[in-house]
Image: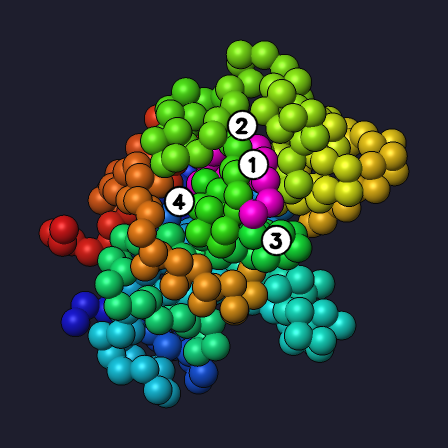
């Protein structure tokens, strides 16, 4: 076996190249994984444009991966299909000490703070390795990580089956929140999205949609909900034009969930929070349990393939970035790291 592997390496703003790197060797307590598929995330785009505060080149990108175990795992045999929960936590701070390591004060991620998985091989600590359930393809296996974000958002929101939910944004995370809501029992799900392709895809997947280019979102949502608003509003857009209306579109005593990462402080109408006794809830990444639930959800009857609009070979990484940054017709763009497969 070659001691080198192809990998996608970030150097500095707009400088990402496919390079040969030494194949990693797993440390004690870590295992080696041969990567099959890897998704490009909004975070990767942020790193690519040089806007991520922590990522420093040279860095192998990628934290949404599927693959097969090669060696180094104490219980799982070689060949087991797996994904990784890409969180690196300190283990010592108060959240870590009280079982909430996903909000570790010094939370770090694979593919941001250390080399990631848009490469032929990646290493991961044993406790972050999750088995991809039987019947779930390698392609869908690479969707477990973003889907776990959706599962976490829905479970943390306090959501009750039958409730009406409003989701801002039909990008990968908005869609993963919407799918989680659907499969976990939401009564009604409405998605607000201005991009025509994403809006159309949301419709095809059976969601009610609101096109903000066609008029006032608050007014249209209130019309659609008998003047009440949504029980739960999930902000997966992270745009000031959305933050401004979040508390207006949410029902009396409803909940606003912040899923998107705002780059700057954004306006929010707190008077509505007080008048309507709203709950504001922030959510970040996922717990091991959310990861397991996301893996199981992929076995359910839903056309997850429609969320993955592109699967590119590693050499076309630049096309992937250009497509997503140029606002092209795409939702999740993945790379296939297995030469000549599927
Ligand atoms: Zn991601
Ligand atoms: Zn910690």
The disc at residue 160 is 3
Q: Could you tell me which residue is drawn at 42 percent across and 38 percent down?
A: 15
Residue 129 falls in image quadrant: bottom left
Per the image, the residue denoted by label 1 is 167
Q: How is the image coloured?
A: rainbow
Camera-nearest label, 1 or 4? 1
Q: Which mark is residue 192?
A: 2
Q: Which residues are magenta?
A: 162-174
Q: Nearer the viewer, residue 89 or 255?
A: 255
Q: Is residue 107 at least partly visible in the picture? A: yes
Q: Of tags 3 and 2, which is closer to the observer?
A: 3
Neighbours of disc 3 within 10 Å: few (<14), some (14-19), many (20+)? some
Q: Tell me whether circle 1 and circle 2 mark residues in contact (CB < 8 Å).
A: yes
- Residue 207: in magenta span: no
Q: Which residue is mark 4?
A: 40
Indicate the position of residue 226 as horizontal and vertical percent values. 65, 26
Whole-angstrom CA distance, mark 1 to mark 2, is 6 Å
Question: How far apart, in angstroms, are the residues tagged by discs 3 and 2?
Answer: 21 Å
Mark nearer the N terminus (1 vs 2): 1
Q: Secondary structure at mark 4?
A: strand
């Amino acid at each position: 076996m070659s001691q080198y592997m192809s990998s996608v390496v970030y150097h500095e703003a707009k400088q990402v190249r496919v390079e040969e790197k030494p194949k990693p060797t797993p440390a004690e307590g870590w295992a080696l994984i041969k990567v099959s598929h890897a998704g490009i995330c909004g975070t990767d785009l942020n790193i690519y444009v040089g806007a991520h505060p922590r990522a420093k080149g040279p860095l192998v990108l990628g934290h949404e991966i599927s693959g097969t175990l090669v060696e180094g795992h104490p219980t799982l045999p070689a060949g087991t299909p797996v994904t990784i929960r890409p969180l690196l936590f300190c283990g010592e701070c108060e959240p870590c000490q009280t079982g909430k390591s996903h909000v570790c004060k010094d939370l770090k991620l694979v593919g941001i703070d250390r080399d990631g998985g848009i490469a032929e091989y990646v290493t991961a600590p044993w406790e972050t390795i999750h088995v991809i359930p039987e019947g779930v393809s390698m392609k869908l296996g690479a969707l477990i990580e973003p889907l776990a974000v959706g599962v976490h958002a829905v479970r943390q929101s306090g959501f009750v089956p039958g409730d009406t939910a409003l989701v801002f944004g039909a990008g990968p995370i908005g869609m993963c929140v919407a799918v989680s809501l659907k499969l976990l029992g939401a009564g009604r799900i409405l998605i607000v999205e201005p991009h025509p392709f994403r809006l159309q895809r949301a419709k095809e997947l059976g969601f009610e949609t609101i096109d903000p280019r066609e008029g006032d979102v608050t007014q249209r949502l209130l019309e659609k909900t008998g003047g009440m608003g949504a029980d739960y509003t999930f902000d997966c857009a992270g745009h000031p034009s959305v933050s401004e209306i979040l508390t207006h579109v949410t029902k009396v005593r409803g909940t606003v969930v912040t899923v998107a990462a705002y780059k700057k402080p954004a306006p929010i109408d707190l008077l509505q929070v007080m008048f309507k006794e709203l709950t504001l809830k922030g959510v970040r990444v996922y717990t091991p349990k959310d990861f397991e639930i996301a893996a199981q959800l992929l076995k359910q009857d839903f056309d997850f393939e429609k969320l993955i609009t592109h699967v590119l070979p590693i050499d076309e990484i630049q096309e992937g970035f250009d497509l997503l940054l140029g606002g092209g017709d795409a939702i999740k763009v993945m790379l296939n790291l297995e030469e000549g497969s599927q």
